[in-house]
């Protein structure tokens, strides 16, 4: 079965650079979520999109932006990177808004290291 | 305020034995959903089990079962016949009128 695909798997950037993370949801999943997981921490919700519109917003810095495209894939754009942005970034998708009884299916994550 | 609380940062269990991970949550909603996710060293987030709040029957998935106590807002995970591959971080998660929120996690180590 197809899973949530994230690219790249690993990314190393310098401070003040920009980064773009991509997420391809499971086919027919219309909702995409982004989470940030720092070392030894639980995943923190950043932002979500339902049918290509932003649905919820969590603790996403103003330096970050995201969008969902017509093919339902999503991109997380991160600018003016800081050392504290180093984390594992998960994308998840669900077949309906907020996943309801089915939960979310997570991708393998993108590990971003800012040096 | 933390919506989901996991009070056990670390736990260990002998292979083949049973272990219970605790989770409590806070919500004013009557309809919500609860989940346990497993995160092994590979860092993949894997859904273990889910429970709808309106169902009184506790969910079961093979060796994994939950004890859902709605009045107490408690949602514990029981792992029976623990296997070495169960070694992972376990996150309790919750959806009501907001997107999924996670507890701080419990690191479970299964010892041979």
Image (cartoon, coloured by chain):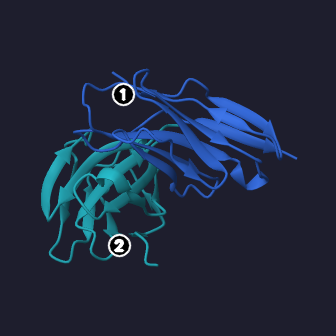
Chain colours: A cyan, B blue
User: Residue A80: percent from the left, percent from the top?
Assistant: 27, 49
Residue A23 image point, x, y percent: 33, 68
Total tally of numbered discs in the picture: 2
- Residue B31: x, y in percent? 27, 38
Which residue ends up furthest to the left in the rendered image? Answer: A53
Q: Residue at x 26, y 65 (%)?
A: A75
Q: For marks 2 and 1, give the CA distance.
A: 28 Å
Chain under disc 1: B
Q: Answer above or below: position of B7 versus A54.
A: above
Q: Would residue B59 be found to the left or right of residue A99 on screen?
A: right
Q: Is residue A39 visible?
A: no
User: Observer-nearest residue: B41 or B30?
Assistant: B30
Rate crowding at label 2 as few (under 14), some (14 to 19) or many (20 or more) other CA atoms within 10 Å: many
A85 lies above or below B103: below
Q: Which residue is mark 1?
A: B3
Q: Which mark is residue A26?
A: 2
**Chain for disc number 2:** A
> Callout 1: few (<14), some (14-19), or many (20+) C-alpha neighbours within 10 Å?
few
SS for dot 2: loop
**Nearer-the-camera pick, B33 or A104:** B33
Q: Closer to the camera, B38 or A15?
A: B38
Q: Secondary structure at mark 1?
A: loop
Which residue is depicted at the point 43% across and 45% down? B51
Image position, residue B68 (x, y; %): 48, 34
* Vertical position of residue B38 compared to residue A7: above or below: above
């Amino acid at each position: 079965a197809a899973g949530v695909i994230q690219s790249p798997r690993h990314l190393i950037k310098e401070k003040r650079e920009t980064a773009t993370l991509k997420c391809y949801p499971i086919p027919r999943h219309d909702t995409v979520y982004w989470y940030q997981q720092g070392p030894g921490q639980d995943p923190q919700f950043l932002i979500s999109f339902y049918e290509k519109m932003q649905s919820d917003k969590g603790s996403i810095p103003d330096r970050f932006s995201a969008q969902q495209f017509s093919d339902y894939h999503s991109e997380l754009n991160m600018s003016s990177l800081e050392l504290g942005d180093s984390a594992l970034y998960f994308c998840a998708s669900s077949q309906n808004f907020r996943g309801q009884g089915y939960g979310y299916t997570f991708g393998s994550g993108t590990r971003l290291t800012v040096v | 305020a933390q919506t989901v609380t996991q009070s056990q940062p670390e736990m260990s269990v002998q292979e083949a034995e049973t272990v219970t991970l605790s989770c409590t949550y806070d919500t004013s909603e009557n309809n919500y959903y609860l989940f346990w996710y497993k995160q092994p060293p590979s860092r993949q987030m894997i859904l273990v089990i889910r429970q709808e709040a309106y169902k009184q029957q506790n969910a079961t998935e093979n060796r994994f079962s939950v004890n859902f106590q709605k009045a107490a807002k408690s949602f514990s995970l029981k792992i029976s016949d623990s296997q070495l591959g169960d070694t992972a971080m376990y996150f309790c998660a919750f959806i009501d009128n907001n997107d999924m929120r996670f507890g701080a996690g419990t690191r479970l180590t299964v010892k041979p």
